[in-house]
Amino acid sequence: MKDSFINLSSFMASEKTKYISDKGDFTPILEKIAFASKIISRQVNKAGLVNILGAASTHNIHGETQQKLDLYSNELLIDILKSSGYVCAMASEENDDAIEVKERNGGDYVVVFDPLDGSSNIDVNVSIGTIFGIYKKIDSGDCVASLLQQGKNLVCAGYVIYGSSTLFVYSAGYGVNGFTLDQSLGEFILSHKNITIPEYGKIYSINESNYNRWQQGIKEYVNFIKSHPERQYTARWIGSFVADFHRNMIKGGVFLYTEDSKNTNGKLRLLYEANPMAFIVEQANGAATNGKERILDIKPTGLHQRVPLIIGSKYEVELYKQYREKYG
Ligand code: P6P
């Protein structure tokens, strides 16, 4: 069948035969997340027209002003996943504590997500996104504890980017595939088959306003990249992780949110930002590190812990580790 006629549901149905024996069937969870993303996409596309734009009067655990669309997306995902019967606990960027599902004695999976990453860009029409990861519940049955597994235990991870089109990208451990929302059909159609990130890129994404707070090795790395002997790199910083990450996935390059003297663990969160994207990038032949170790090997100690994140093409990520280690 031509790719233009393969929708997300049929793709997942055929792919799950590869893993169902050891991972079980989590496709209903993916279907639910895809459904929620269609609704979020609709709201994002009309955010300027309804009273959903702008900041709500609340803040999340990180002290960040919660945009109304943040709250809407968060509550939508929680409600839809709660009613799925497959999920027994969730962790969201927007909720201080874990969400345990008591209804229908939960299910065999736990889900971590950032419902609307980059939401400070909503009011200025910059692409934003949803990031998610799915784990099997630990056999001991403690659902909330199952949220703190290492990223390498993920059975599935993905993101949705609400940009010039709405794109659903995910991996169940057998490569990375992207599906574009055909608004007229209300279907995600296979559009990016077997995404593989180039071995090296010509793009580096870092907020250079933090330069003066960086450790010396980070400064030397960025300066080397800017004057690379073999190729001219260009700087791109959208300020929306999903958008910067996706562009680098397609074109090659590296995204960095490192530690600095003010943010000693960087800014991005391990559970629902770094881990899902690290799972995806490794499936696409890329790499992700905190500067010292593989992101997916880090044992989480808290739902909202931050981690330095260097992620993208193998060449730029591995090179960073050499510079970062120079100064301990
Ligand atoms: P800065 C958005 O708030 C976010 O968490 C990521 O999406 C984005 O990459 C980063 O923060 C931008 O941070 O410090 O440049 O505003």
Image: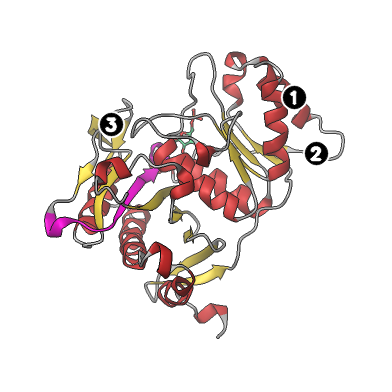
User: Measured from the top left, where is residue 310 in percent x and y?
Assistant: 59, 35
Instruction: Kindly identify the amino acid type of the residue bearing the numbered disc 3.
Output: Asn
- Dot 2 or dot 1: first in sequence order is 1
What's the CA distance linking mark 2 and mark 3?
40 Å
Instruction: Kindly identify the amino acid type of the residue bearing the numbered disc 1.
Output: Asn
What's the CA distance linking mark 2 and mark 1?
12 Å
Q: Residue at x 49, y 18 (%)?
A: 264
What is the quadrant of residue 223 in the picture? Answer: top right
The residue furthest right is: 229
Secondary structure state at the residue bearing disc 3: loop
Name the quarter where the C terminus is drawn: top right
Depth check: give the residue in front, 310 or 151: 151
User: Measured from the top left, where is residue 258 in percent x and y?
Assistant: 56, 27
- Dot 2 or dot 3: first in sequence order is 3
Depth check: give the residue in front, 93 or 21: 21
**Which one is closest to the eye, mark 2 or mark 1?**
1
Mark on residue 60?
3
- In the rendered image, residue 33 lying in the magenta stretch gets the answer no
Does the CB distance between marks 2 and 1 fall below 8 Å? no
User: Measured from the top left, where is residue 51 in percent x and y?
Assistant: 23, 47
> In the visual, does 290 lie left or right of 306?
right
What is the quadrant of residue 191 in the picture? Answer: bottom right
Does the CB distance between marks 3 and 1 fall below 8 Å? no
